[in-house]
Amino acid sequence: MNAEPDGPEDRLRRFATIWSRAVFPVTTTSSTRPEFEEQLLPLARRLSEALRARAFDADEARALGAALVTVHCTDPEALSRTLDCVDAYLVLYCGGDGDQQDLRLRASRLQHAMAAGFAQALRERTRAEQEAISAAALKAQGVVAQALHASEARFRAVFEGAAIGIGMADLDGNILQVNEALLRMFGITEQTMLGRNVAEWTHPEDAPQTWTLYDELVRGDREHYHVEKAFSRPDGTALWTNLTVSLLRDADGNPQYQLALMEDTTERRLLNLRLRYEATHDALTGLPNRTFFFERLEKALGAGKGQRFGLCYLDLDGFKTINDSLGHAAGDRLLVEVADRLQSCTTAPGEMVARLGGDEFVALTTGPDTEREVDELASRIMNALVAPVSVDGRELTVRGSIGIVEGPAGERSAAEVLRSADITMYRAKASGGNRFELADEEADARAITRHGLTTALPTALDRGEFFIEYQPLVHLGDGSVRGAEALVRWLHPQHGVLGPDRFIPLAEHTGLIVPLGRWVLEQSVRQAREWRERHADAGPMRINVNLSPCQLTHPGLVQDTVDILERTGVEPDALCLEVTESALIGADDDLLKPLRRLAEMGVDIALDDFGTGYSNLANLRRLPVSILKLDRSFTQSMQQFPADPVDLKIVEGIVSLAHSLDLAVTVEGVETGAQAEQLRILGCDTAQGWYYARPGPPERLHELALVDATG
């Protein structure tokens, strides 16, 4: 088996080879297949560039379709095989590392534009042939007026032998002569044709200017015109033609006859319609696809004053589980059934449903009263999903989350509307699913901001946008500074300083929390070394660093910590790692093993936010912690005077239990001296809060430590 091509040029050459093998049998070229492949290679390169271009260039795509005619691919089968190759292999061999969904959408649009360009080029080529025949006919007609006996045979040969239909009529529209090709196109006899008048050939699909051009021609105001026109055959079918009508004048220049040349384009039109349908409809469900939906949405958004739109963006809940457990074939059958149900919900004028991809569908309603109609549409969709779907003998429950966007036309672009609907749908899914939510501008703005922050996070660390503030830990007995908690901040270029609550969850979601946490740990430990060197006489200074749940499960936690301590020359007892109580609820031995190893090294482990979750006090015996950090909710209850005696008893009990287990107790959120005194009386060891200092630069801690050292 040959190896897959490595470089882009090799992959491009492979695509050109596949293309030439598919199309060569139906060409009229005299070249060999390798020679024909070399002719297709530049076209393949242009196709590849059009696929990956920043913006879609419809003119280039049409030019590529026209180029097929230039290389003798004039048979409609050559176009069909070309489009099949583009659909199956262009993204595979020329797409590179781009977004596959966007590339396939671009490939679909390329196919449609190429088909249009091919049809236009073929039509122009035929028109040139028609004009040559017309010129010959005109010449023959002129010669007849001067020397009929010399031109009759030549004109008859052109007239009868032409592959296109030719007919001649007088200026009143009475048909005088027709050739065999025209009779075959209409499927009638010569006697029937000669008894007709041109004015009888009106058709509902006629363009508005068709008969205006005809009137101008028979009046002598126009020499010829060209239109696409449909005719009705006796069997009821439609004959589509490229029609060229020319005016024939006598020797004195007076209008005398009209000459019509017709090219049968019915099959080509059907091909274009089929290609258009395939390019705008989902192959699995038969619903309109993303391309068609955007066309309709943009039309709805461009409607006149007083028009509104309503959009329901549906995503099936738990569809991935069905695919993973029952297979993609079962998932496809489920999607087909869902599509049928959704289609039954959108039967009113101005309504449509489309499949955007995967298990995502969208329903659109338009008109002046969509505020009410879109809610009713969403309710119909939810009700349509209630009944289980039977797949392979299994009854599958189908649920969906819907995001609704409704508003006046002309205020937002299609991309903005769909983005808002997508955000709202995920908000419905986050609320438990099986429901619909209305779009909210503030919620959209928050989601967009979150997305922007998530996108900017990976480079923010490299650009040095993070910094650390320190909040002192104060001993309640003598008021001395015993250390500080490191709190990371993000100096965002647009949003300013962001607290950890704004970006730590995003960092955990993206996995950036591990390198960010490693950076915070190293910077904090270096700061602890500096404090100890500058204030050796003030007692040991400890740095507290928070660990996220993701960091706890990272296999490099222990080694990273050891490497940082050794690299900075700091003893383990200068470091305290804070872990939230919720992260350790139900923790097994594997999760606790890294913490135990760190504790055995001399690193303190603090159980942060103690009291906010299910505080299983008996569980403290097996946790490798040396410090309990009481949540600020306990200190807030002490702001009133007198303090709630029940809360005091709870804190007193926790402190007593902690001390009996040789655990120190730190309290967060101390804001007043009364709180600090009450906590000292209850036996708490250390505290932190605005009463002592807000989080700030490390220099502030130097000042506090210096005050303690000097009394």
Image: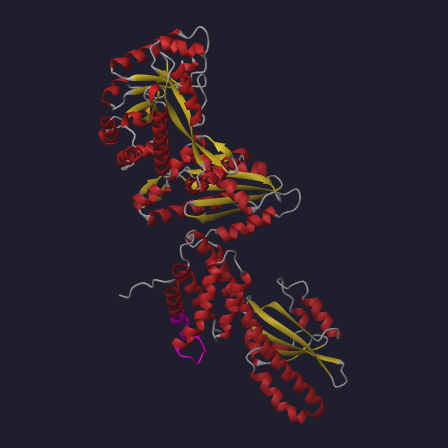
Image x and y of residue 62, in percent: 53, 65
Image x and y of residue 257, in percent: 70, 79
- Asked if residue 6 is positioned above or below residue 499 in the image, the reply reads below
Left or right for 584, reference 508: left
Where, by quadrant of the figure, is residue 603 drawn? top left
63 drawn magenta:
no
Image x and y of residue 19, in percent: 40, 68
Q: Residue at 25% across / 31% down in the picture? A: 594
- Asked if residue 692 is positioned above or below residue 548 in the image, the reply reads above
Q: Which residues are magenta?
A: 19-32
- Asked if residue 214 is positioned above or below residue 49 in the image, the reply reads below
Q: Which quadrant does the C terminus fall into?
A: top left
All told, the count of numbered labels is 0
From where the camera sits, is residue 671 visible? Answer: yes
Q: Residue at 57% across / 49% down in the picture? A: 298
Q: Residue at 47% across / 40% down in the picture? A: 451
Q: Nearer the viewer, residue 668 or 335?
A: 668
Q: Residue at 53% across / 60% down in the picture? A: 57
Where, by quadrant of the figure, is residue 195 drawn? bottom right
Image x and y of residue 656, in percent: 29, 11
Q: Nearer the viewer, residue 166 or 682?
A: 682
Left or right for 487, reference 151: left
- Asked if residue 626 is positioned above or below residue 439 in the image, the reply reads above
Left or right for 249, reference 96: right
From where the camera sits, is residue 186 visible? Answer: no
Q: Which quadrant does the N terminus fall into?
A: bottom left
Q: Nearer the viewer, residue 602 or 172?
A: 602
Left or right for 282, reference 580: right
